[in-house]
Image: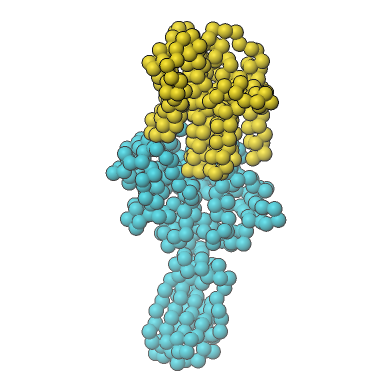
Chain colours: A cyan, B yellow
Amino acid sequence: MTEILKIENITKKYGSNTVLKNISFTSESGEIVALIGENGAGKSTLINIINNLTERSSGKVMIFGNTSIKDKSLRERIGVMPQQDISLEKIKVKETINLARSYYKNPVDYKELISLSNLKSKENELVTDLSGGQKRLLSFAVALAGDPDLIFLDEPTNGMDVMNREKFWNTVLKLKNQGKTFFVTSHYIEELQNIATKIMILQNEKFVFQGTLDDLRKDQESTQIQFDSQVNLVNFKKIESIKTIKQNGQHFIITTNNLIEFLKDFQVFYDEISNLSIEQNTLETIFKNLSKGGQDND
Amino acid sequence: MTDFIYQTKINFLRLALRNKSFFIYDVIFPAFFYLLYTKILPVNQSGPLTEEWNKEYLISMLIFSATLISITTFSNFILSDKQNKFELFVKLSPISKIQYYASVIVVLIAMKLISFLLIGLVGGLVNSIHISAGTWINLILVFVIGTIPFDILGLLISQSGNINLVNVLNNIGVFLLAILGGLWWPLRMFPEWLQHIGKLTPVYQLSNIMKSVVLNSSFHVTDIIGLSCWTVAFLVAMYLINLKKE
C-alpha cells in the first residue's frame, strides 16, 4: 500500500472564525476513507482545500508525494465528484462523458463509463432532462473519466434511489479492490459503515476520531442493552463494564464497550430481568452520541 | 489536438447549433433591421447614393450582429457555465482555462462568420450589392480581428456573476453602443456633443474601418489606434478583476 495523500496541520479561518484546526491525516492506496461530520463541520471545506479550490490558512497538502496540486498533470490522477452537479445545458449525456474523457491523456473507455454510471438508457438525453439521482451518476462517470487513482466523492448518493445507491457502492468497492483510493463524505452514515476502511469524524474544527469502525466501537459506547427489571438501579451500577445506565420506571438502558465482560457480570441478574434486547451501535448511533457529547447517567 | 477539436465541436453545438437565440437574435434580428432600413422604409430609391447606403448599412448590421454574439451571447454562455459548475469541471480537470477559453473563442469566430455570411447573403440577394471577392476577404479579416474588443467586453460582463446584472450590462453594452456608434442611425443625426462621444466608441471605429474597406476609400489610423486602446483597456480591466478575485 502506497501513501497517496498526506495532510499536515491544515487550518482554515474565515476572518476570526476557525473552521478547521490542525487537521492531519494520511491515506493509502486501496482505502475508502469516510469523512463524517455535522452540517457545517468543514467536510466540503477540507475537500476543497485538498483540491486547491479553497485556500488554506496554514498547513501542507501532499498528493502522490507532490505538494503542488496546481501542477495540472496531477489532475490526471485525481477525480472529483463535487457536491453540486455539473448540469450543462444543450448537451447530451454521451457528449458530457466524452467531453470529460477528452480532457485526459488515458481516459477510461466510454462503454465502461456508461456502464459504471448505469446511464446507458439515458445516453442520448440532454443532461438537463435527467433526474437529480441520474445527474449524480453522471457526475460519478465524469469523476472516473480519467481513470484516476484518487477519487473524492462529496455526498455522492444524494437524490439516488435505493437500487442505484446499492449499485453505486458496489462499483466503488470494485474499484477500491483495483487499488483506487476513495475519500467520501456522506450524510447516509449507514452506507459508509459497510464500505469504509477508515473513518474520520470531524467535530469542533478537529478530528475527534480516526481509525476503523471496530476501533470506533471499542472507543465509544458500542453496544446497547435494554431490559425490564424490578431490581434496584444501585445493584446494576456495581457492574464495572457498564459505561452508562438509564432508568425509566422498570425499563433500563445500559451501554457498554465490552459486551462479553458485561454479560459475564450481568448473568447473576438473568432470573430477574425480562424483555432483554442487545443492539450493537451503528456508526450513525455512535456519531449521534458523539455529537450530543455524552449520555445521560442516572 | 483531437481533444481540442472535440471540445470545440461540443461548444459549437452548445453555443450555436442548439441555441435558437443565436439564429433569432444574433442573425435574423440584424438581418431584419437591414431589410427594414434598406428595403421597406426607403420607397422607390435607387442610384449610387442608395447603393452606398445599402453597403454602409450592411456593415452596421454586421457589426451589430457581432456585438450581440460577442457581448450578449458570449457573456451569457460564460455565466451559464459558471452557474452550471462547468467552470468547476474545467478547474478539476487537467486542461487549462486558456484551452477552455480558446475553444470558445474559436466557436465565437465561427458564429461571427456564419452571421457575416447570412447577413451578407441578404445584402447580396436583396439589394444586389456588388463587392469584389478580394474586398469580401478583407472585410472578413477586419471583421474578425476588429470584433475582438467586443469578445473581451463580453467576458468582462460575465465576471459580474449575477444574471440580472449581466442582462442589464448586456443591454447597455449592446444597444447603447449601437446607438452611440451610429449603427442604427447615422451619427450626423445626433447633436454635435453626442457625435464626439459616439466617435470614441469601438463600434464607430470598427464601422469606419469596414466602411472604408467596402467603399475602397482610405481609413483613419486614429480608428485603428482607438480600437487597439479599447482592446488594451478591456484586457487590463479583465486582468485587474482576476487579480482581485485571486
Left or right: residue B233 compared with residue A140: right
Most extreme residue toward the right, as rendered? A16
Residue B225 on image: x %, y %: 66, 17
Residue B113 visible, this orientation: no
Which quadrant holds residue A229? bottom left
Residue in front for this viewpoint, A254 or B3: B3
**In x, y percent, where is residue A162?**
34, 58
Image height check: is B29 above or below A197?
above
> Looking at the figure, which quarter contains the C terminus of chain A?
bottom right
Whole-percent x, y for residue A214 in the image: 47, 63
Q: How many marks?
A: 0
Query: Residue at (36%, 45%) from the top-left corner?
Result: A129
Q: Vertically, is B199 above or below A226?
A: above
> Residue B159 at what x, y percent from top left?
59, 38
Give A247 or B94, whichever is nearer the viewer: B94
**Viewer-proximal residue among B119 and B160:** B119
In the rendered view, does A223 fall on the left or right side of A70?
Answer: left
Q: Residue at x 54, y 62 (%)?
A: A38
Q: Nearer the viewer, residue A1 or B154?
A: B154
Is residue A125 visible to the viewer in this orientation of the structure? yes
Q: Residue at x 49, y 76 (%)?
A: A255
| Residue A235, above or below B232 | below
Q: Residue at x 61, y 58 (%)?
A: A206
